[in-house]
Amino acid sequence: MNRSSFIPILLFSLVSSFSTQAQVADTNTYLENTKKELNAVWPKSRRINLVFHGHSVPSGFWDKHEVHTLESYPHLVLKALKEKYPHAGINIIITAIGGEGSINGQKRFENEVLIYKPDILFIDYALNDRFSPLEKTKEALEKMIIAAQEKNIKVILLTPSPDQRIDISDPSNPLDPYVVQIRSLARQYNTGLADPYVLFQAIIKEGKLKEHMASVNHPNLLGHELIASTIIKWF
């Protein structure tokens, strides 16, 4: 084979390799090992840690700063998983802080998140990240993703729930670039992706957003159930 014919083949191989890797993880296989462990029965079973890192929404904030912990989507996920995996010992650990963005979340990541040795890590910051420069939030998210993957932790990134002061049905809204960034990072790092943003956009078209919101920027039980549904499909 001469040099001129070898180069196109090499380029095709490199492009094919990149396109294979640069995609969101497969819902059927990404958590395959974890699902096997969730199905295990004592004494072959072990504790499974699910860690939810982010802002006020996974924390369970509703209206007037009330925190409805048991009606937040991490606990709704736990409830659904216990129905599916009755023999599993599952810990739900919420490291989220109201009002926080990914830049500060990354600063405490090693000492306040990795310390729990997550089996699966959920990251939900986009709603607040819109107040910070896009490139800075990307850097923070990347650092967290890479640090988790270096410890063989499965990562699932979340797109945001809405703020009613923003029309998320309009592609030019200020939240949309952060949604695009999260989807891009999920592809780049082959992580899981839970995408409730799409579902909330559909609800807006139906004129039913207020039915899913406890306050201007916090979902109610219906809203949290919607977010949980995008996570449960991974299991």
Image (cartoon, grey):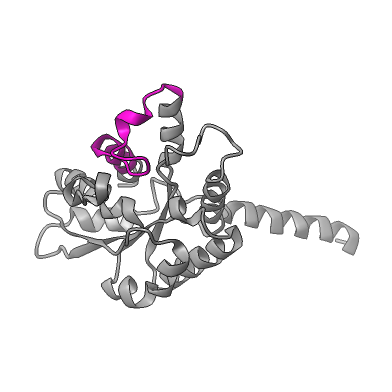
The x, y position of residue 232, in whole percent, is: 30, 44
**Which residue occupies 36% across, 57% down?**
55
Residue in front for this viewpoint, 26 or 225: 225
Residue in front for this viewpoint, 96 or 225: 96
**Which residue occupies 36% across, 41% down?**
230
Left or right: residue 78 versus residue 124 is left
Looking at this rendering, what residue extends furthest in the bottom direction? 111
Left or right: residue 84 versus residue 132 is left
Work out which quarter of the rendered image holds the N terminus and state it.
bottom right
Left or right: residue 70 versus residue 125 is left
Residue in front for this viewpoint, 41 or 23: 23
The x, y position of residue 174, in whole percent, is: 56, 45
**Which residue occupies 27% across, 55% down?**
59
- Does residue 164 show up? yes
The x, y position of residue 71, in whole percent, is: 20, 45
The x, y position of residue 54, in whole percent, is: 36, 59
Task: Verify whether residue 211 appears in magenta.
Answer: yes
- Does residue 62 show up? no
Q: In this view, does 112 lie above or below 165?
A: below
Residue in front for this viewpoint, 20 or 150: 150
Q: In this view, does 115 lie above or below 204?
A: below
Looking at this rendering, what residue extends furthest in the left direction? 42
Residue segment shown in magenta: 205-229
